[in-house]
Every structure is written in C-alpha cells, then in structure tokens.
C-alpha cells in the first residue's frame, strides 16, 4: 500500500496536503479527515513542500501529494508548476484539488506532472475514488535516478547544403541501431530553431511542447525535457525544431548548457544538429561535445568557410582539436584528379579528414522526401554503409573513453 490509512502496513507514510489556507477550500478538511482518519495526512505550506519531500533518515517518504490550488494561485502558476514537477521528481504522485481555477491554469499544472485533478467542493465519493486510484498506482522511480552521463556528438555544416542534417539524422539512427543490444538510449536534438529540418527528414510532427521547453529552459527538468521529445522507430528520441520560426537568441549559453545536460543525463549518446550561423552558445556546444563533426565539400566555398571557422576558434582560444572534418560527397575510387584536389585542400587548411563520405545519389534526396533514414529506405546505399561503419566505430570509441579502456 502507498497511503497510510487506519490498518495500513506503513501508517507512518503520510499523504501531504499542500495549501496556503486549507480552510478556504470548501469542505476539503472534513472530507480528508473522513477518508484519512487518525492523522493519515499532513498539511504543508507550498514554501515547505521541497523540505517535506526529503524525509529525515529512517523516516518514511511521503505517500502522495494532494495539491490544493485556488483562484489566487493563478498569479503564481509558474511557482506551483515547479512544485508539482519537484514532487514528481521525488517519486511522488500528485492529485490537484482546484477551486475557481481557470482551465488553462489547470492544464498548465497537469502538464507539469500532476496525475489527476478534482474540483472543490469535491463531488460525493470522488475523493475516495481518487485516493483508491492513487493507492493502485505503481510508485514512481525514487529521487535521484541514475544519470546516464551521455556523450555529445555535435554536427555542424561549414556551408549551406553540404548535407550536415542528413548526416546527423542518419548517424543518430545508426547509433540507435548499433546500441540497441546494450540498451543504449540515443537522442537527436535539432538546435536550428529557425529552419531545422530533422522533423522533415524523419516525418515527425513539430510540437508546441518544444517551444514551451525552449522558452522556459531555465526551469526545465528531466520530465519536462522528455515530454517534449518525439520517438522515431521506437529507438530514437528526437527534439525537433519548434513549430514556428524563432530568433536564435531565444537560447542563451546557459539555456543551451542546461538543455544539453538534460539530454546527457537521460541518454547515453546525444547527437546535436547545429545551425549554420555561429551564435553566442556555439562555444557552449563545442565545449560540451565529445566529438564535433564539421561537414564540408570539395569546393572553394567550403574551403574558405572552414578556414574562417578555424581562425575564429583559434582567436577565441577554443579547442580546435575537437573539430573533426568530414568530407561529404567525396570522389570515387577512380577519380584521381578529384582525389588530388582533396589532398591539396587538406594540406592548405592544415586539417585531416576524419571521414570521407561517398555521394549517395538520388536515393538520399528521396529518403529525405519520404521522411526515413537511409537504413529504412535504401539500406544498400553506399553513403548509408559508410555512416553505419562510422557509427559503430564512434560508439566503440565513446564507450572506450567512458570506461577508460583503450
């Protein structure tokens, strides 16, 4: 049993009733005393809830939270939503008791993690039924879930149209496939909040929850982050770009840092697709990344942009050694002239190519238009095979670095 009622196995586990003034909620105290006699609940002021969620050593954890909210609470809705999320994060189920609260406010608190809500005055028998449902619910994971401490792989296109998003999407999917036997969780973040196309390439809906997450990222928690994710193929979790075009400065360096920490805490590998424009938070991503893949092609535009990009990093004393150049649409085996150009470009830029990806041809465009990774649409495609090899090597390297095994 979860709730401590008369005759329960654990009477010391009390239900927390959160309210500024319980007497202002019509008939609520009488109803609680009838359903939970013998001190089966404890009143807690909202300001003391976080403290009450952390019982003293040896004491029983709270059995659940009844959160009473009235009309005057609508003015501090964000604070109340944070408290609901805190209760969920502590492994406790939450039921709302609302009196004269607008529907939009109730919806906001439900999105924060509440399991159910009842109007006050509570209809006859409804409180008993809600408490019965609460007893039947399986306990949530306790506080302090295991953090996965995931590795971050950033993907950046040196110029528009070099195939960075296609690479990011297919790399993330191949990582998810390669890690499925070990139970690894993989996430793909589309950080191009203006024109990101990850959702298009995977045929996923753009959700309003993404904008809510990004606009309130300083208050977001793991539950809120995972609520904004969309799952592709039961294996890959995706944070798509928002539904509408947003200014790049909606994200701050601190906000992006928090977003990346949330992703890494809940996933083993995180792939981030970056916008072409360098922002104030680009340095944050570079600093957090285990690998930073910069895609380019064999043309003067890519060469000049790569040179300027590397100069900018060196001028700011940023870790240039993290940048791995990835050459997309590399020449084939017999194209010796083009191979010579590739070699000369690398020498003039002072770089080495970590990967050389072949041209996947029309199948790549068709796969993107159909909203499917190459593995699903054209499994034998040369580009798909090379990305699969790269994903397997990358996963092995990341796991070796994490365990300290060479």
Image (cartoon, rainbow, N blue to C red):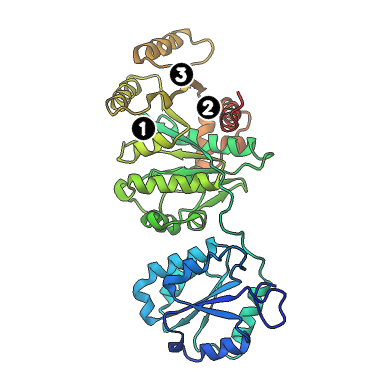
How many numbered circles are shown? 3
Q: Which residue is mark 2?
A: 360
Q: Quadrant of residue 161?
A: top left
Q: Which residue is mark 1?
A: 160
Q: Nearer the viewer, mark 2 or mark 1?
A: 1
Q: Which residue is mark 3?
A: 353
Q: How much space separates mark 2 and mark 1, taking CA atoms? A: 18 Å
- Residue 403 vs 121, above or below: the answer is above
Tell me the residue at 54%/34% (across/down). 171
Q: Nearer the viewer, mark 1 or mark 3?
A: 3
Tell me the residue at 46%/67% (across/down). 83
Q: How much space separates mark 2 and mark 3, taking CA atoms? A: 18 Å
The answer to which of marks 2 and 1 sits earlier in the sequence is 1
Q: Position of residue 8 (x, y in %)?
A: 71, 78
Q: Quadrant of residue 1?
A: bottom right
Q: Secondary structure under badge 2?
A: loop
Of all residues, the one furthest to the left in this rendering is 315
Tell me the residue at 37%/39% (across/down). 284
Query: Foreground: 351 or 52?
Result: 52
Viewed as shown, does residue 150 lie left or right of 304? right
């Amino acid at each position: 049993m979860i709730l401590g009622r008369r005759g329960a196995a654990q009477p010391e586990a009390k239900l927390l009733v959160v309210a500024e003034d319980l007497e202002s909620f019509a008939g609520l105290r009488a109803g609680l005393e009838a359903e939970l006699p013998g001190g089966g609940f404890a009143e807690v002021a909202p300001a003391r809830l976080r403290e009450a969620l952390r019982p003293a050593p040896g004491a029983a954890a709270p059995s659940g939270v009844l959160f009473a909210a009235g009309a005057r609470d609508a003015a501090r809705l964000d604070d109340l939503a944070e408290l609901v999320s805190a209760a969920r994060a502590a492994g406790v189920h939450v039921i709302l008791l609302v009196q004269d609260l607008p529907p939009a406010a109730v919806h906001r608190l439900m999105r924060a993690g509440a399991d159910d809500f009842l109007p006050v005055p509570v209809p006859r028998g409804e409180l008993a039924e809600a408490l019965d449902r609460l007893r039947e619910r399986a306990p949530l994971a306790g506080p302090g879930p295991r953090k996965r401490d995931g590795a971050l792989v950033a993907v950046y296109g040196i110029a528009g149209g070099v195939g960075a998003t296609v690479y990011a999407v297919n790399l993330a999917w191949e990582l998810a496939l390669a890690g499925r036997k070990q139970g690894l969780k993989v996430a793909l973040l589309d950080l191009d909040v203006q024109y990101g196309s990850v959702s298009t390439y995977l045929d996923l809906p753009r959700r309003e929850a993404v904008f809510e997450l990004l606009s309130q990222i300083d208050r977001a928690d793991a539950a809120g982050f995972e609520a904004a994710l969309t799952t592709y193929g039961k294996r890959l979790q995706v944070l798509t770009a928002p539904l509408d075009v947003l200014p790049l400065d909606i994200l701050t360096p601190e906000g992006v840092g928090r977003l990346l920490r949330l992703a890494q805490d809940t996933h083993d590998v995180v792939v981030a697709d970056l916008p072409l424009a360098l922002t104030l938070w680009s340095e944050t991503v570079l600093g957090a990344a285990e690998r930073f893949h910069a895609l380019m092609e064999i043309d003067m535009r890519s060469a000049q942009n790569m040179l300027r990009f590397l100069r900018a990093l060196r001028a700011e004393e940023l870790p240039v050694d993290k940048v791995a150049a990835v050459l997309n649409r590399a020449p084939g085996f017999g194209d010796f002239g083009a191979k010579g150009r590739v070699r000369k470009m690398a020498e003039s830029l002072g770089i080495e190519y970590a990967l050389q990806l072949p041209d996947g041809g029309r199948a790549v465009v068709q796969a993107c238009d159909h909203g499917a990774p190459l593995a699903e649409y054209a499994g034998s495609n040369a580009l798909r095979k090379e990305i699969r090899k790269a994903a397997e090597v990358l996963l092995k390297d990341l796991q070796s670095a994490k365990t300290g095994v060479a």
